[in-house]
Image (tube, rainbow, N blue to C red):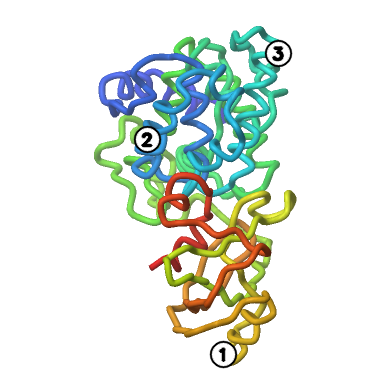
Amino acid sequence: MQKPLQNITAPLVNWYEANRRPLPWRQDQEPYHVWISEIMLQQTRIEAVISYYQRFMEALPTVEALAATPEEQLLKLWEGLGYYSRARNLKKAATVIMTEYGGQFPTGFDAWRKLPGVGDYTAGAVTSICFNERVPAVDGNVLRVIARVLGSRKNVLETETKKEVTALLTAVMPERSGAFNEGLMELGELICLPNALPLCGDCPISAHCTARRENTVTELPVRIKKMKRKKEEKTVLLLLTEDGEIALEKRENKGLLAGLYQLPNCEGFLDEEAVIQAVKALALVPQQARYLKEVKHVFTHIDWLMKGFAVTVKEKNDRLIWATPQQLEEQYPLPTAFQKFLV
């Protein structure tokens, strides 16, 4: 299987270097820039990441600043990107870099792999792009491209398939390894598309693609999910004082959305009468309840089905945190799932 992959290295590198997008983290090969962008890009589209990346770099321009920043400020910067454990691991890894490496980034794959929150893909991306280490960086885009090039019908969601692709790419990794890895990613994002017809006429390696030759591009890659998604129903309470302050709670420091803030909520779907009783149970005096809307928020392994009510209360109490709209904007990291109910 190596020969088709050997044939794609040179044309792919040349195509990437001639056509790569001028993304902000590509302005240099600074490890801090590449690392932060790669973590942000996990599970998030490039177009959405750009503004977050720029804001993050303005606030925390160095690994030293990242290591020193208070966690709540970091989570506020990360607000909207989701997967908040990624942000916490960034700070942990920055602390390791400052304490164990004297603020200098390690240059090898194995050292990067030991940093908190850094897996094979991120370690491969950073060390190949920044230090030209000849290691692959295999993500979903790369798995899709390689499956089509090889005509492979192995399930790309299986760990074993990813290991096999990693081994195959390791064996053919060219000298310009960073450009090759980014070229594979760029090809998967722009040309060898998921959930759409790939733009084979624009592909620099189409001559070596088994799926194109056998007319199976729409059948590949094979993705077979084994996990059954869990669904939870919730009623979200937007509790408001007459002055416009909003009630918040802080979540436990473990589990989903650990340590972040949330709007008070109850399990299950409540009607208006039950909502009034739930507000009274918080030692508040409800004045008026108003139905807002129903929304769905999708996490990796679970869906939240949420129904929201806005409730005006007579007085605030000390059981909850009360934030002005400005404080909510600047200070408290509120997950997107709850932001959907702010009016």
Q: Amino acid at mark 1?
A: Asp
Does residue 2 appear left or right of residue 92 in this picture? left
CA–CA distance in space, label 3 to label 2: 38 Å
Locate the C terminus by quadrant. bottom left
Q: Amino acid at mark 3?
A: Thr
Viewer-proximal residue among 167 and 306? 306
Q: Position of residue 14 (x, y in %)?
A: 32, 18
Q: Position of residue 37 (x, y in %)?
A: 46, 30
- Say which residue label 1 marks: 271
- Say which residue label 2 marks: 187
**Are the residues at dot 3 and dot 1 in contact (C-beta closer than 8 Å)?**
no
Q: Is residue 41 above or below residue 123?
A: below
Classed neighbour count for the residue bearing mark 3: other residues with Cα under 10 Å, few (<14), some (14–19), many (≥20): few
- Say which residue label 3 marks: 99
Q: Residue at x 62, y 79 (%)?
A: 279
Does residue 118 appear left or right of residue 180 in this picture? right
Q: Amino acid at mark 2?
A: Leu
